[in-house]
Image: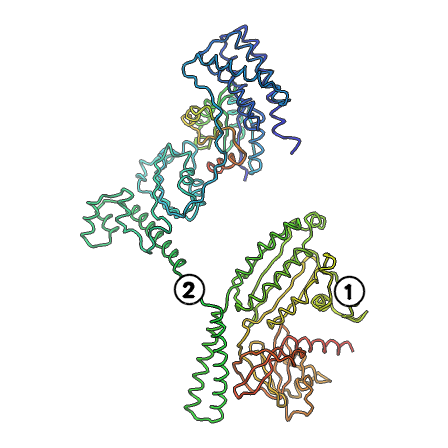
Amino acid sequence: MGKKALIVDDSASMRQMINFTLDEEGWEVAEASNGKEGLDQLHLTHPQLVITDIHMPEMNGIEFIKNVRTASEFKFTPIIVLTTESEKSMQEKGKEAGATAWIVKPFTPEKLKEVVKKVCG
Amino acid sequence: MEISDPRDYYIEEASELLSEIEARIVDLEKSPEDYELLNTVFRALHTIKGSGSMFGYDEIASFTHEVETVFDYLRDGKLLINKKIIDSTLMACDHISVLLKNPQNADKELQEKLVASFRELMSKVQEYAPHTAEPTPPLAEKTQEEPRKTYRIEFKPGREIFLRGIKILPLLNELSDLGEALIIANSDELPNLEDLNPEHCYTTWTAILTTSSGINAIKDVFIFVEDYSRIKIDVIDEGDVLGTEDDYKKIGEILSERGYMNVEEINKIISKKKLFGEMAVEQGIVTPDKVESALAEQKYVREMRKRRNEVQTGSTIRVKNEKLDYLVDLVGELVTLQARLSGYANKDGEAELLNISETLEGLTSELRETTMSIRMVPLTETFRSFFRLVRDLSHELGKNVELVTYGAETELDKNVIDMLKDPLVHIIRNSVDHGIEHSKDRAALGKPEKGTITQGAAYSGANVLIEISDDGRVLDPEKIRKKGEEKGLIKSGSEIGEHELFNLIFEPGFSTSEKATGISGRGVGMDVVRKNIERLRGTVEVASEKNRGTTITIRLPLTLSIIDGLLLEVGDGKYIVNLSDVVECFELTGDLLGISDNNSIANIRGEAVPFINLRTLFSQQDASEGNMQLVVVNTEDQKTGIAVDRVLGQTQIVIKPLSIAFRNVEEVSGSTILGDGSIALILDVNKITQKAREEKTSRIAK
């Protein structure tokens, strides 16, 4: 009840696809198109799940994750980072910054649901 | 969904990004060193690639990857921007635009040329390795079905695991979902309160999991935590191959396998000849928690093996049907012989003989019940087979039907079940075919789109009730009346209750259109259903009510062949009623007939009970001497009386089929041979009840 998620991605089509998928699973979804907006939305919506892309203008995903983790309210919040097949190193950087899990693009809505279930129950 | 297809979104987004790239490239010509500009172009390309692969634009994704890599190097200063790169990038943008909007017009040659030129640029960078079109890994790897094994999974999360947003409970749930699991938490490492950091994880878990999903599926559960945790997975039971005995490892073995103690320590404890776990704790080698956990594993595997062995070797044996039938026949003979003996002993009156006869009667009765119970099987299999029937049939007819079951554990004689199958198939077919409507029709009627058929069974005294009901179309009394009159089954305009009207569908000749037209109503073949059920000494009825649907109820006797009966006498004829139907017996005195002017309704404690005089029924002319006896039977929650000359007593009887001469006598369902060799007829209590009720109504009508 009242599960809230925040999607941070500069691609509107990605946000839409994730939004749709989470909506089906009963999540209330907030969106942001870069890390900076993401932080604003984070403190506005207090989500229980954060999904973020890496390459974004203003503030990239890695910086964003670090910022989320330093806010004591979101110390334990699951963060899923979206990476691509060609960037294994980003997965590591995401983990170092404090990401909980990752999904490699391209992925299906089912895969997304699976990972969300894994980290959120 | 068509208004917001993510593909449309993507095309729009990619087009915007392409025009942004073009604008930035022009700026880059002026200020080639501007990192932010390079970064913006890189991100735009990255998004076109990443989202493209998401929405099925694979060609765009792989082509854009080449351009993106160039900008990655430019960003990192490994390449320097020049006119050639700018020109190629602009051409690439145009090409992507074509791929996006009219992929069929794409110039393949140009694409290859561009890819070649980007690769050439990159080949100057040392670390470059061309991106070969590697097949994308399957998105959802289905876990392979493997032999069922039992694993021990030791999961020790890193202290700071919670600070990564990792939650333990979903993981353990996921693990449990793989099969049958026992999860034991171990809090050994929990520090003293003053040293405890509430944000840290001190607990470790041991899971004993029996699954056929295989080790990869187990590893997959921990994919996001493996870097920060110690995970050890061992096979501790190989399913069928090893460990066929009920027993499992000793506690010491488990503790050493888990690395809690070494061989030397084990031997030291064994020499003490005490409970191993206790000693290990006593000597401070392991904590009580660890012993508890090992004991839990031991218990789990032992119990699992025991269960498995029980299934395999089984505590049951299979016996041929014929042997059982023969056994039942023999018991029947014995029952008859025993009745003869007890008749003789009673007449003779010798104490010892009476004693032997009575003991034998008890034993015979027990033997009979045991023999009958051997033949009883649950309806589970029969009911289960109908799931497939309903599924196939509803697919074929394009209907959405769910089959719900209750009481499948109800047992019936094997022979009854075998003979029951065809009628049940017929009834269920009718329900799917003629009862349940198509989804859209149901929706229009305000019913749930999915139709429900319920099959169920329950005990009711010495009978079993089987019900098949559906929430589809109900029977139309007017139509049935019309048809009944047409076929001459009822008199036109006759007053007849809905119940009787509906049950006309079981009359032979009511519906015969099945093969001729293929369009048939519910009544099709129901006469055959009734005939089959009556052969099992059962009855069948239908009830149909708006909002409640249609229910067909079959009532069957528990066993086919031997029953406890009450022996009755009328004139010089002997009759049997099933003892389980009998409620009480009375002397039919004048008081009982007080409210009745024509001797057909008895007043039993203020209750009007209709009764039938067997003398009248079987046309015995001479009047009986003295008072008659009234046997009150109970069927379908209604009491009916049967008036007879004398109630002779209780006896076990073997049911024999009727000879053809009696087939038309509805009130008689079978016969039996009594101990003295004479014959008694078994009364069909249901039929008699019905008759008495009919007479009562017709009398009231008059």
Residue on which disc 1 sits: B483
Query: Left or right: B259 with respect to B435?
Result: left
Q: Quadrant of the N terminus of chain B?
A: top right
Q: Amino acid at mark 1?
A: Lys
Q: Chain of mark 1?
A: B
Q: Is residue B262 above or below residue B32?
A: below
> Do discs 2 and 1 belong to a common subunit?
yes
Judge whether B467 appears above or below B448 on screen.
below
- Give the residue number, with chain letter if any, for mark 2: B316
Q: Please, what is the three-letter code of the amino acid marked with disc 2? A: Thr
Q: Residue at x 42, y 46 (%)?
A: B212
Image vertical order of residue B662 relative to residue B204, above or below: below
* Residue toward you, B310 or B285: B310
Q: Residues within 10 Å of mark 2 (few under 14, many from 20)?
A: few
Q: How many numbered callouts?
A: 2
| Residue B41 in the image, given as x and y percentages of width and height | 53, 15
Disc 2 secondary structure class: loop
